[in-house]
Image (tube, rainbow, N blue to C red):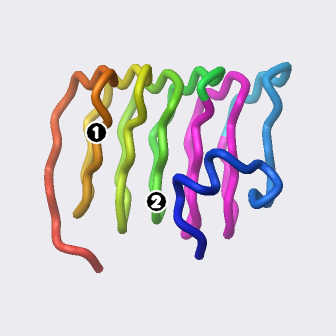
Amino acid sequence: MADIKEIVEDENKIDTVIADDITFRGTLRFKNSLKIKGLFEGKIETDGSLIIGREATVSADIEANEVSVSGSLNGKIKAKQKIELFKKSRINADIITPDLHIEPGSLFNGTCIMEEKD
């Protein structure tokens, strides 16, 4: 799989994009990669990559392989591989992951539990 930072910058490499004019409430299940640019509330389950765009507002419980956040997130995240928090992201969440990257300029409030990779 391509490096997630590369995927964040090139939407053509993402399988599905929820555009910034979409509001979605419910449960999302998918296998590959998804980028959210709009508003999402609910639950997300995937063995793939979740990318939360700079424009996005997400309130969800998330279970994924990799999670990359550039926007606003409230909830819980459990990532099997890694979580990346990019500059100007706003995260209020409890997270569980074996690998955490926090870019300077991001805001993280919550708890973090580091686990070994599966």
Q: Residue furthest bottom?
A: 118
Q: Badge 2: few (under 14), some or many (20 or more) residues near its Cα, within 10 Å?
A: many
What's the residue at 59%, 70% (across, down)? 2
Instruction: Identify the image quadrant of residue 102.
Output: top left
Magenta stretch: dominant SS?
Answer: strand
Extent of the magenta region: 27-53
What's the residue at 36%, 51% (across, down)? 83
User: Which three-letter amino acid code belongs to the residue tagged 1?
Assistant: Ile
Give the secondary structure at mark 2. strand
- Label 1 sits on residue: 102
Q: Foreground: 34 or 89?
A: 89
Q: Does the magenta segment cover residue 86?
A: no
Q: Position of residue 17 (x, y in %)?
A: 79, 44
Q: Position of residue 25 (x, y in %)?
A: 70, 29
User: Which three-letter amino acid code belongs to the residue tagged 2?
Assistant: Glu
- Label 2 sits on residue: 66
* Relative side of 47 to 27, left or right: left
What's the residue at 36%, 38% (across, down)? 76
Q: Position of residue 27 (x, y in %)?
A: 65, 44
Of labels 1 and 2, earlier in sequence is: 2
Q: Badge 1: few (under 14), some or many (20 or more) residues near its Cα, within 10 Å?
A: some
Give the secondary structure at mark 1. strand
Q: Position of residue 118 (x, y in %)?
A: 29, 80
Measure the C-alpha gap from mark 1 to mark 2. Answer: 14 Å
